[in-house]
Amino acid sequence: MQHELQTKFRERFGGPANLYRAPGRVNLIGEHTDYNQGFVMPVAIDLSCWVAIGPRDDRKLVIYSEDVDATAEADLDGEAVRPTRTWSDYPIGVAVLLQQAGHRLRGANLYIRGEVPLGSGLSSSAALEVSVGYALLETSGQDIDLVQLALLCQRAENEFVGARCGIMDQFTACHGQAGRALMLDCRSLDYRLLPLPDHVSLIICNTMVKHELASNEYNLRRFECEESVRRLAKVLPDVHALRDVTVKQLEENRGRLTPVLYQRARHIVTENERVQAAAVALQAGNAGAFGELMGESHRSLRDDYQVSCSELDVLVEIASRQPGVYGARMTGGGFGGCTINLVASEHSAEFKKQVAYAYHSATGHEPRLYLCQASQGVQSLWASQRDGK
Ligand code: GLA
């Protein structure tokens, strides 16, 4: 793969290239909590976005994407670069935000290959942003602070691309570790690495559907959470985000919220508790307890937060019936995309077979299933070649 990408780069742009990769992610538990300053527990996966990059003598960025077979250009010295509402807003947005933050970038040619399936809830966009941001900084001889890089990539997505995502995806693409889950506090950005039990497999099942309403509903949920905070803060002055609300406080002040706002808030407040309980379970190697919490999370997302869909529910229901399954839930923003399943390793081959068959019979969609390994966050591959690793 590495050699092939370098060859492709040379054929298109001439000259040698340095290689970078950043992973997609799957979230084990803690959904829609990141923009409420709460807790999440994602894993960086072994599907990545790859960038081959070589410097240019001028201050242009020329970016080729294999996925869409298209090239985009931006002049780093030119008039303010504007979004075009296409794929290139992600890499160009990152370059624009890096420059605005005071990083003077060199012109460069980039050849991009994405392995993370697009629009599947596995954060292909964060993988693209982080791999490009890291590659541009290193090519320009700039220091890289991974927390700052994650925050800048999130801002690029919020301000340049126009999607109001939280910090989970970019942070995971930066800080993932092989064999570990990240327990991230999205307020302080402190995190712990938690071991994944040896005998269990993480299996991602892709529903292969993506419902149109996803981004509107995402923004609406954010608004509903903010509105709940405004109402609760009138009587609970220490509440700045739903992260600060306890279940008891929520129940006592239920009358201040509409029924829908109450449901949204209840998901967030209980989900934060579940993530913390899940961290204890993982630390103790208790896959059974962890799996129970995954099931509760799914039901809360389905019934209270209302971001699931029939395909995700069917997939979770089928998975939960299989032998050796500890837990199953939707993962990511919802309205399609993937589920994550915690399965005893000796059952994983049979699980994949049975689930694929039953989901196809129930919905007519051919699902994709991946046995995924928790992998490392963004890395420069030429450094490992250079250092003889
Ligand atoms: C999307 C966003 C994340 C997070 C999840 C839901 O993936 O990009 O920031 O909010 O949805 O947990």
Image (cartoon, rainbow, N blue to C red):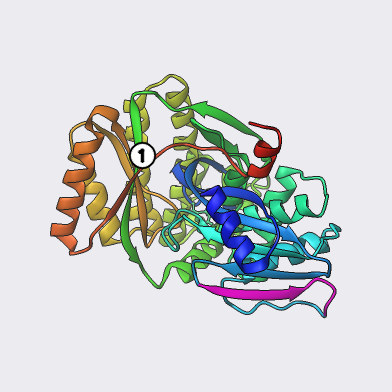
Disc 1: residue Cβ within 8 A of ligand 1's nearest atom: no
Q: What is the span of residues highlighted in magenta in the rendered image?
A: 69-78
Q: Quadrant of the C terminus?
A: top right
Q: Residue at x 25, y 35 (%)?
A: 348
The one nearer the camera, 154 or 310, is: 154
In the image, residue 69 sits, relative to residue 194, either above or below, namely below
Q: Nearer the viewer, residue 52 or 313?
A: 52
Q: Quadrant of residue 264?
A: bottom left
152 with respect to 321 (left or right):
right
Say if residue 111 shows up in the picture: no
User: Which residue is identified by label 1?
Assistant: 294
Residue 203 magenta-highlighted: no
| Direction from residue 143 to residue 89 in the image, left or right | left
Q: Quadrant of residue 293?
A: top left
Residue situated furthest top in the rendering? 284
Main SS of residues in magenta = strand
Q: Is residue 311 above or below residue 379?
A: below
Taking 123 as reference, is 188 above or below it?
Answer: above
Dot 1 amino acid type: Met
Mark 1: few/some/many CA within 10 Å (<14, 14-19, 20+)? many
Asked whether, in this view, residue 183 is left or right of residue 345, the answer is right
Tell me where residue 172 appears, x and y as whole percent. Answer: 57, 44
Residue 215 appears anywhere in the view? yes
Q: Nearer the viewer, residue 218 or 153?
A: 153
Residue 285: percent from left, percent from top: 40, 21
**Residue 281 placement (x, y as % from top left):** 42, 25
